[in-house]
Image (spheres, helix red, strand yellow):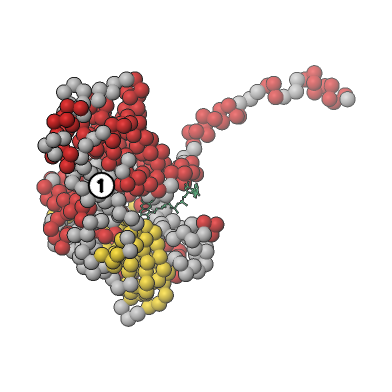
Amino acid sequence: MPARTGAQFLRGLNDGREIWVNGERVSDIVGHPAFTGAAHALAEVFDLQHQAADVCLMPDPETGEKVNVSHMIPRSRADLERRHKGLERIAEFSVGLMGRTPDYMNVTYAGFAGRHDEWSVNGNEAGADNLVKYQKFLARDDISLTHTIVHTTTDKAKGDAPTGYDDVQLHKVGETEHGIVVRGSRILATLAPFADELAVYPGHPMPDASDVHALSFCIPMDTPGLKFLCRDSAAANGNRFDKPLSSRFDEQDAFVIFDDVEVPRDRVFIDANLAVYNAVMLTGWWPNIMHQTMIRAQTKLEFAYGLAARMAEAINANQPQAQQMLGEIWCFAEFARAAIQSAEQGAFEYGNGVWFPDGKPLVALRAMLPTWFPRVNEIIRLLGSHNHFTAPNAAEFANPSLRPLIDKYLRGANGVSAEARARVFRLAWDFAGSALASRNEQYERFYLASGARNLANAHMFSDRTRANRLVDRFLTEDVPELRATPAQQQRRATA
Ligand SMILES: Cc1cc2nc3c(=O)[nH]c(=O)nc-3n(C[C@H](O)[C@H](O)[C@H](O)COP(=O)(O)OP(=O)(O)OC[C@H]3O[C@@H](n4cnc5c(N)ncnc54)[C@H](O)[C@@H]3O)c2cc1C
């Protein structure tokens, strides 16, 4: 089956999956107020790949049918540049606000399948084979995949991963004729209501865990026993003038409970095999997925720059302080663009003929974004001040008695109409101040580990060869003053 349309995607969502929001089990995902905006937005993402087929689609290497370019297993720098264009087009749709559009997991699984040799160790040949077959299914059936890779927090003092056996954490409890049975929980499947399938794979190594926790698999969202508890909705059910972003881009995040879930044998990629679990994510996964997620982040930064500049123009806020803050956002966007370009230029073969970007610039960028994104929001709030709250909504513009007054008293500078001004400031508040904005800031701080952890890792895994050479010149040079003079030596000898 080739790349799907939005209508085909929407038809797959109301499948009986167990999705809970605000205490309610939702049967109609597509029509529910918490989900309808994002469901239709994601349908537009599926349609977009056909509208922009030249950048978004590519022929499947075996069937020749058109599949999304995010499924590509990159085998050269040119492949990565080709993939960049497709990923960027998808990121532009939500201006980077949807972090987990399906291309995120497509890139992940293309990387896994390309490096199946890493999974095919310690007796896991069958698991690696299942993984390769699954990636083809993912691409050809154009599946929307969510994932949960982080262990549930009960007691921070216990550490990040289970020690021995922990009944809260996802684990294997048995075997059936057709597969394995798993129980437990994990955080925090973004996109869950809008996914066709759920993926479980290693988040970080678990040196001291029991083998029963060492699992990787993919299963349909309606698999019996699978339950998703969504966070409070940040979706706004207003029109797109009032809530241009939160009316459509709340991708949701859900806590996952596996209440004795049977995983078919051919969907198991790691079956209680700690050695494999601890080995597979160590090389190419990070730079590969960073390619997708940093293209998204760069798009969001550039959008934020454009938005902030439009705010300043609307009220002619061109004082030096405003220009300085605008320049700050531009710098973030430009650093991000340059880092991605550098990573692509430094791409190399990681093994098995598979190419990923150079990880170093992307590690640096990932580590800084949890600081940059909150600062971007701060700047937008500072630039906007009270103007965020003097931006009438659509109903007020539509009111014939209010409209002339709004047009007169709430117009902007240099001929900017009241409607144009309100559009800018409503968009800005939805970006930086709404419930969705707050969730998005939390996402940027924590997805794929916190900024603090990313900074620490950046240091711990850095190549310090040149840094050491620069410093050692001063630490190892001969300093005569450190040594005793002959006269001093003579005095000591005779003392
Ligand atoms: C909006 C959102 C969406 C998410 N979506 C997904 C998803 O789709 N799939 C998924 O699997 N997971 C998802 N996650 C989970 C995410 O991967 C984790 O939140 C992330 O790994 C951080 O782990 P933690 O929440 O336990 O926080 P911690 O890592 O424990 O951090 C909490 C605080 O402690 C500090 N800290 C803790 N340990 C260290 C350390 N060793 N060094 C330095 N500082 C430390 C950090 O600075 C931080 O401020 C999502 C999270 C959020 C917020």
| Residue drawn where x is 25% and y is 65% of the image | 26
> Relative to 258, does residue 114 appear above or below in the rendering?
above
Residue sitting nearer the eye, 345 or 349: 345
| Residue drawn where x is 42% and y is 62% of the image | 277
Q: Secondary structure at mark 1?
A: loop
> Relative to 282, does residue 85 appear above or below in the rendering?
above
> In x, y percent, where is residue 199?
32, 62
Q: Is residue 233 visible?
A: yes
Q: Residue furthest top?
A: 487
| Residue drawn where x is 31% and y is 61% of the image | 21
Rendered-image quadrant of the C terminus: top right
Left or right of residue 471, residue 375 in this image: left
Residue of label 1 = 246
| Residue drawn where x is 21% and y is 29% of the image | 410
> In x, y percent, where is residue 374?
38, 39
Residue sitting nearer the eye, 196 or 38: 38
> In x, y percent, where is residue 481?
69, 21
The amino acid on which the numbered mark 1 sits, given as a three-letter code, is Ser
Quarter of the rendering containing residue 189 = bottom left
